[in-house]
Amino acid sequence: MDLFWKGTLLVEHKSEGVALAKAKEQALDYFPNLKEDELPKYVLVSDFQRFELYDLDSTAEHKFTLSELPGKVELFGFIAGYQKRKFKDQDPVNIEASERMGKLHDMLKDSGYGGHELEVYLVRLLFCLFADVTAIFDKGIMLAYFRP
């Protein structure tokens, strides 16, 4: 093992021209001897001319040469503490809910209820709706309140 950063990175280097598959196999052979919290999130193998970076969380593999390294520097953001974030599409129910709140806002504003009072009312209403769903309030209490 040429470099080991507990919980983050394991590096295995080989001489130029040696198969990197062998370096990866050797790097992974260290895993059974590591504690759970020591297991790295990344494995880097190289022969100083070719590099292979494995992101073990996402199973992404990045293979590049030394001359390509400057264009791949963002792959090593984890060294500086940067974390990748994945954003997923909004749940359709959230989109529909926000559209309905927008319509309610417009209807109340058109009826003459506006300004700060309208904004406070909508924020409080939104809190109550989430409180009902998350069981801060008794389950179904908001629905019971609005239904005749």
Image (spheres, rainbow, N blue to C red):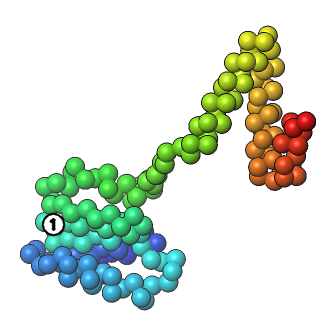
Residue at x 61%, y 41% (from the top left corner)? 94
Amino acid type indicated by mark 1? Arg
Give residue 101's position: percent from left, percent from top.
Answer: 69, 29
x then y, percent, for residue 51? 20, 66
Q: Quadrant of the N terminus?
A: bottom left
Quadrant of the image occupied by residue 10: bottom left
Q: Residue at x 81, y 20 (%)?
A: 117
Q: Quadrant of residue 68?
A: bottom left
Asked whether residue 6 is in view, the answer is no
**Up/down of 127 relative to 62, above or below:** above
**95 left or right, relative to 70:** right
Secondary structure beneath label 1 = strand
Q: Give the residue pinned by disc 1.
A: 50
Q: Is residue 101 above or below residue 131?
A: above
Observer-nearest of 141 and 37? 141
Q: Is residue 42 above or below residue 38?
A: above
